[in-house]
Image (spheres, coloured by chain):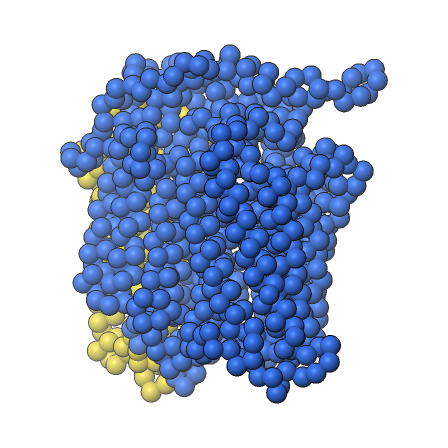
Amino acid sequence: MADAAVHHADHGHHTSTGLSNNKLGMWLFLGSECLLFGGLISTYMIYRGRVGEGPRPGNVFDIPFTSVSSFVLLMSSLTMVLAVAAAQKRDDRGTTLWLTVTGLLGATFVGGQVYEFTAMYNEGLGFTTSLFGSAFYTLTGFHGVHVTVGVIMLLSLVGIIKRSRVPGDKAEVVELVGLYWHFVDVVWIIIFTLVYLIPT
Amino acid sequence: MAIIERPVPVGVPDIPAPATPTRTFGALRRPVATTGWKSWVFTVDHKKLGIMYGAVAMFFFIVGGIEAVLIRLQLAAPNGKVLSADVYNQMFTMHATTMVFLFVMPMAAAFANYFVPLQIGARDVAFPRINAFGFWTLVGGGIIVNLSWFFGGAADGGWFMYAPNSGPVFSPSNGVDFWALGLQITGIASLTGAVNLIVTVLNMRAPGMSLMKMPVFTWLQLVVQFLLLFAIPVITVALFLLSFQRSFGATFFDVSAGADPLLWQHLFWIFGHPEVYILVLPSFGIISEVLPVFSKKPLFGYPFVVFSGAAIGFVGWGVWAHHMFASGLGPVSVAVFSIATMAIAVPTGVKIVNWTMTIWGGKLNFTAAMHFAIGLVVLFTIGGLSGVTHAVAPSDTQQTDTYYIVAHFHYVLFGGAIFGLFAGFYYWWPKMFGKQLNERLGKANFWLMVIGMNMTFGPMHMIGLQGQPRRMYVWTEARAGEGFFNLAFWNRVASIGSLVLSIGVLLFLINVVKTARSKQVAPLDPWDARTLEWMTTSPPKEHNFDAIPTVHHLDEFFHRKYAQDPVTHEIKQVATAEDIMRDQEANADKHIHMPSPSYWPIILAGGLPVIALGVIYAIPVAIVGAAIVVLAMYGWSLEPSTAPDTDFDPPASGDGTKELAPLG
């Protein structure tokens, strides 16, 4: 089984572009995701001033708190890089360690988002309060779901590596999850800047 | 378990080899059937999936066609009583939705699935299981969209579903919910298909096949898949916003809550305009294969056809607002989009010139496929010209929401996209099924369709310019007017035309049944074709090619059959298709790995409609659907796409394996 995996991995390099199918596929998917977030961000930018009777963005955002959770998420990109590096050195212990750390940092970010949403809801900003509320929760919610999916992938990957059940090239699978993870982080940088830092 | 396909000399039957199936979760064995219904339902073979895509698309073509005929019957006479106003609204909405999302797109996907791997000399697509998933997802989405007919009425806001028509006041039934969620699901199918086909084309070409040696059909499919890759996420956002509005009380498009209804229009058309190129470019690709073969000439200006296709792909992103000239965008936007729209006529015109020059001076062979291909060039040009009149914003303001628009897009979609697909049926049928469709019936099919389509959509130019609004459910004698341009006469002509058109399509179905019953086997190379898909048996073996060909030329198959005499400069036949086949069989690859069938694609795809129904009726059901999806994802990721070497008989060492087309 392990031999077979190596055997297939070797074949992965005989492609016309030299990039493996999986990696090219992931890049294309992320390209598509750019347009998804593009649409959501545009919607938010159009509606962020339409607060109706509800609270204004400046009143509900807790920028220091969100900055800290953004920092946590950005650090998870660093640990992800360490996981990929360990995987490329075929160091299973290092890989699982750093994947777990990345997953936990991601989970911390999601936890922060849940806390933040709860606080905002208590301050009177529900999903249907105003166009600003709907657009805000939709955009950050979609991002949160992406992070959550990423955390699940990371932790599942830890389990699968520990049981040696990775189909295909282990280092590449880690790298693919890494690509997705970095993408989600980069999107957060854009969202954080546009949503929180630019005043309405 | 793996499919063990080793090329055997002709005449010796394949002996199915015993295998040790891999188990996922320690319980589920991989499906092993190579015959019977299981071999179709769990297949990951791009050819079987292509045929299934085609069958499903044809079913929806008939559904959409019946809807169209009902619309025309309602308008055949004054004060039509066939449909009520409400049902009429559902009918035209579902007619358009069905034809666009469930017929033309899947049928183009059918051809892409079947022929792109064959044309580039690959053994399958890059992600065979994702391919199967895409097909079953499409089926699920199609069912959800149409299920609404039986649950209180279908969507009725028109296919572009503008606010406030999509809101609860004007669409109180669940139709729009089914529509939005169903299209969301078919969108997933298109997106996965796009990733899959792009990777296939970029990564899995036969040795020597550079991008500029690729057949034009593959090229234009590549452009289409890029359009899908970037257009689908935009409609995904729009549909999510709509679903959130309808299901969770958001007000994204509700003007009374301060929303901007133009947001939907922009999001929809940023998807919707690339979408029209998604619909028509595959057909352009098909006729770019058909015209050279039946003119006995290479395609005139191959690089121009390719690059104008790519140019359409780029400029297609900058013209969406020409659908919104009447919405008050302001003079600057209108001017910009007006000019961009005129500009996009140029690459399309380049193509028309190239096709004409391909036919020019050729040794023409008027087969049914050739009829349809030439039909496309003529009819699409008419539709293209009326399209340019929309690019002129002042004239468009006059034409918006009239039958003139209906005439225009039926000329480009019926005369363009659908004629191209029919050319593809007649051209590739012998390759897919080993039997040729009847040519005489085919030509009758063509002429009835041409006459029917011109009778139906031609008069719409006139009644549109006379002011008959689009989506009007009834007309009265008193307001029909008099003289040559009276609405009554031309509405009747259009309705009769739609019946002629239906008979034409019926002839095609009769032709299919007749051909299926006939025992006559098609020759190996019935059309004297030029591209790689003809360099294998008909229908192709599971592994497509016994030996992966090395490509030296554009139109490689032609160059293997014909060569120029160095002295007389005459083109002479040097080999027959049979010779080339024998050569391939003699040099067959020793050990070929093919992807193994799997349960997970259909299980994963099956979870999505359950989620959709749950969102509409009861959230717990959606949670069950989500559980199915999660379970299937784990099963999928733990299962290798190709069964391990120990499943092979004899077990593969990896050394003797010539796997030129790697499978992920």
Residue furthest right as drawn? B568
Please give the name of the residue rendered at 63% of the width and 31% of the height, measured from the top-left corner. Answer: B527
In front of the other: B175 or B302? B175
Please give the name of the residue rendered at 46% of the width and 55% of the height, measured from the top-left corner. Answer: B62
The quarter of the image holding the C terminus of chain A is bottom left
Where residue B220 appears, as percent x and y from the top left, is 59, 45
Where residue B115 appears, as percent x and y from the top left, is 52, 37
Q: Quadrant of residue B273?
A: bottom right
Please give the name of the residue rendered at 27% of the width and 27% of the height, measured from the top-left corner. Answer: B1
Q: Quadrant of residue B171?
A: bottom left
Where residue B110 appears, as percent x and y from the top left, is 48, 44
How many numbered circles does the render carry? 0
Where residue A145 appears, as percent x and y from the top left, is 29, 58
Where is B284 relative to A92, above or below?
below
In this view of the protein, can residue B244 be seen by the observer? no
Q: Quadrant of residue B247?
A: bottom left
The quarter of the image holding the N terminus of chain A is top left
Q: Which chain is yellow?
A: A
Please give the name of the residue rendered at 63% of the width and 82% of the height, measured from the top-left corner. Answer: B480
In front of the other: B70 or B389? B70
Whether residue B618 sits left or right of residue B234 in the image: it is left
Q: Please name the color used to draw chain B.
A: blue
Where is A150 relative to B247, above or below?
above
Where is A40 relative to B397, above or below?
above
In this view of the protein, can residue B506 be seen by the observer? yes
